[in-house]
Image (tube, grey):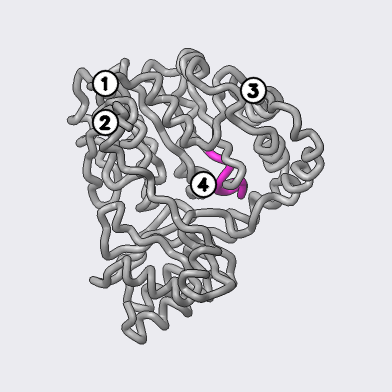
Amino acid sequence: MKLKIPEHIKNLIPYPPGKPIEELEREYGVSGSIKMASNENSLGPSPKAQAAIAKALQDLHRYPDGSCYYLAHKLAARLGVEREQLIFANGSDEILALLAEAFIQPGDEAISSHPSFLVYPKVTQAQGGINRGVPLRDMRHDLPAILNEITSRTRLIFLDNPNNPTGTIFSRMEFEDFLAQVPEQVVVVLDEAYWDFVEVGQQLDARSYINGDRPLVSLRTFSKAYGLAGLRIGYGLMNREIADCLNRVRPPFNVNSLAQIGAMAALDDDEHYTKTLAMTRDGIVWLGEQFRRLGLRPYPTQANFFLVELAGLDGQTFYKAMLRRGVIVRPMTAYGYPDFIRITAGTRAENRRLLAAAAEVLREGTA
């Protein structure tokens, strides 16, 4: 078979997914593992969402609402925006792909930081575009350097705030100064997947910018603070012109019925949301203190995860040693940080088990 596959597709490196917990346990001969590698909500989904989803199972023979009508109305009212300014998708990742499909033609360029979310250069390359990676500066987006990379071919700029994998943010003043200097034809994509975890007073309010003279798209998700990662539902906030453009390339029925129903119910569960934020903040503080006592270097973060520098140890080896103890963390080799791991803050019991396993690995020198 002689398939004619474009070079930019042949050279595309697939996103590296993690193995299922069950497969890792089989491979390493352990059981009862805890997963602290994928920035998920350890409390699980909202009880209200679970109840609403269970009630809706009888209607699975029906196609979902292709416009997310009721969810759009509910969220628009909560955010104080127009329903037509919202786009829903199969995770906010899909909106990244829609943006690239809508705005990137072969030879066009996008800009993202490095390291940053691995999907940005992938969606650009998938459209035949070129991604310009700008190194972080002090673990933060180097906004002046990004401005210097803009050319006449630049169509998109991807900024995750907080950044994944570092958990760092930029200030409102820094962002406004940056945005004012971006050419009017360049779309700035503000990926706010971890927005909920940012300290109050330091959060950007995308609603202040989406109707300005610079095109801006804000992306958020129900995967993290709302605990619905398995349902894959995210949304974008933007001006009507960009939303209309994305709706032209968006697949019909891209958000399944259970995701829509679960998201609507989760929005009403303030107790679960508040509990999630409190658990995460407490976990980040406690784990940071404990890792410093072990002689490692945890970095400050505004997300539900943080980076830990292993003081010269190899992250991949440390990861495997932790796996043998039933604790899954994320090595940062794919992000260009071979002696780092990324850890998600979990429940108190998970955090204590994680710390005990890490201390054992370091004590025995198995890393």
Q: Which residue carries the number 1 mark?
A: 106
Is the residue 312 above or below the residue 239 in the image?
below
Q: Is residue 321 visible?
A: yes
In the image, 343 versus 213, the foreground residue is 343
First in residue order: circle 2 vs circle 1:
2
Q: CA distance from mark 4 to mark 1?
A: 41 Å
First in residue order: circle 4 vs circle 1:
1
Disc 4 marks which amino acid? Answer: Val
Q: CA distance from mark 2 to mark 1?
A: 9 Å
In the image, 333 versus 115, the foreground residue is 333
Is the residue 117 above or below the residue 219 in the image?
below
Q: Which residue carries the number 4 mark?
A: 200
Q: Residues within 10 Å of mark 4 (few under 14, many from 20)?
A: few
Give the residue drawn at x 22%, y 40%.
Answer: 134
Q: Which residue carries the number 3 mark?
A: 66
Disc 3 marks which amino acid? Answer: Gly
Q: Which residue carries the number 2 mark?
A: 8
Please identify, in this view, whether the residue under mark 4 or under mark 2 is nearer the observer.
Answer: 2
Disc 2 marks which amino acid? Answer: His
